[in-house]
Image (spheres, rainbow, N blue to C red):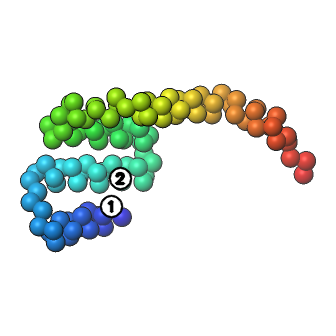
Amino acid sequence: ISSIIIVLICLICSILDVPWGWEGWFVVGVIALSFVVLLNDSMPPDFTMTFALALVMAAQIVSTEEGLAGFSNSAVLSVAVLYAVAAGLTATGALDHIMNKLLGSPTS
């Protein structure tokens, strides 16, 4: 599937006559690699995306300020906190306890 996506991106870029340097191909490779890792579920999504960002920043395609600018948005921080709360509720089983109290246990 990822090879199909890469071929489609290459075809679109050749049709639009987009001049890519090594930076463009590097980013396409990082996106394809991230997509494959996410599909295989071999690493957690947060680690995969953070690693992809780190690769692009290490190659100096994106500056550190540009790469980390999204984390200054309060919406991103809110979602991160909600992920931490959801992981805590799942790990402790508190959500199961609350749902059993609200919905009850099945009788049959």
**Of marks 2 and 1, which one's residue comes earlier in the chain?**
1
Instruction: State the quadrant of the N terminus.
Output: bottom left
SS of the residue under disc 1: helix
Residue located 32% across and 35% down the image = 70
Residue extending farthest to the front is 74
The circle on residue 2 is: 1
Question: Which residue lies at the image location 28% right of the left edge and 51% below the top edge?
Answer: 31
Q: For residue 13, which quarter of the picture?
A: bottom left
Q: Residues within 10 Å of mark 2 (few under 14, many from 20)?
A: some
- Mark 2 lies on residue: 35
Asked which secondary structure carries label 2, the reply is: helix
Say left or right for 58 vs 51. Answer: left
Mark 2 is on which residue type?
A: Phe
How many neighbours does mark 1 have within 10 angstroms: few (below 14), some (14-19), or many (20 or more)? Answer: some
Q: Is 103 rendered above or below residue 77?
A: below
Q: Amino acid at mark 1?
A: Ser
Query: Relative to the observer, which residue lies in front, 88 or 41?
Result: 88
Let me know if residue 71 appears in the view. Answer: yes
Residue at 37 percent across and 32 percent down: it is 73
Note whether residue 80 is visible: no
The mark found on residue 91 in the picture is none
Q: Are marks 2 and 1 in contact (CB under 8 Å)?
A: yes
Q: Position of residue 43 (x, y in %)?
A: 42, 42
Q: Position of residue 26 (x, y in %)?
A: 18, 50
| Residue nearer the viewer, 107 or 21 | 21
State the image quarter where residue 52 is shown: top left
In percent of the image, x 11 and y 57: which residue is there?
A: 20
Q: Is residue 30 left or right of residue 23?
A: right
